Image: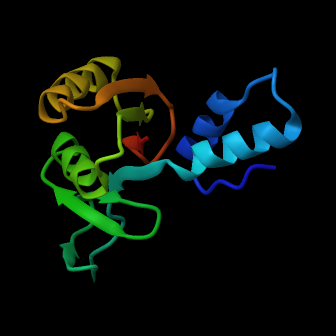
Amino acid sequence: MIPTVNCPQGISAIVAYNPELSVEDNLGDMTAAADHVKCGQITHAVRNTKINGFSLKEGDIIGLDDKKVVAKGATVNETVQKTIEKLLDDEIVSINLYYGEDVTDEEAESLVEELSKVFEDQDVAAYPGGQPHYYYLVSLE
């Protein structure tokens, strides 16, 4: 069993699987791949609150890491960019967006184009995730 705390870590672990390797080697490689992932979630505030320096109103678009609110924006796209900026470090080479059921293919493609101009040193891609409640799950690897 590979310990993960979010879907992007699980996906990264699965991609690292190599049927040619032993169970032990796969366990090490898959765990390392999962550990390298940073994850953000883009959703909306469900109530009025003040948390982590943010004053939130119900419906505000927010970005989370695995533990706390890290960004707030006027639009989904702005919040995605702010969240990535908070999570990004020098080791990140790819940004993968898994878009939810409320995001169209065209909206996701447009966001990839925007982000590719901002984050020129990273590969940016989007995939249909279909998840409810979250506009995007963002995987930084």
Q: Determine the residue positioned at 18% across, 76% down.
A: 55
* Image vertical order of residue 34 relative to residue 72, above or below: above
Assign the C terminus to one quadrant of the image. Answer: top left
Residue 126: give x, y in percent of width and height: 38, 25
Residue 35: give x, y in percent of width and height: 57, 52
Count of numbered badges drawn on the protein:
0
Residue 127: give x, y in percent of width and height: 44, 24
- Say left or right for 79 vs 30: left
Residue 102 in view, yes or no: no
- Say left or right for 28 vs 124: right
Q: Determine the residue positioned at 36% across, 60% down.
A: 64
Q: Determine the residue positioned at 65% across, 31% down.
A: 16
- Say left or right for 137 vs 114: right
Q: Quadrant of residue 47?
A: bottom left
* Image vertical order of residue 69 relative to residue 21, above or below: below
Residue 129 in view, yes or no: yes
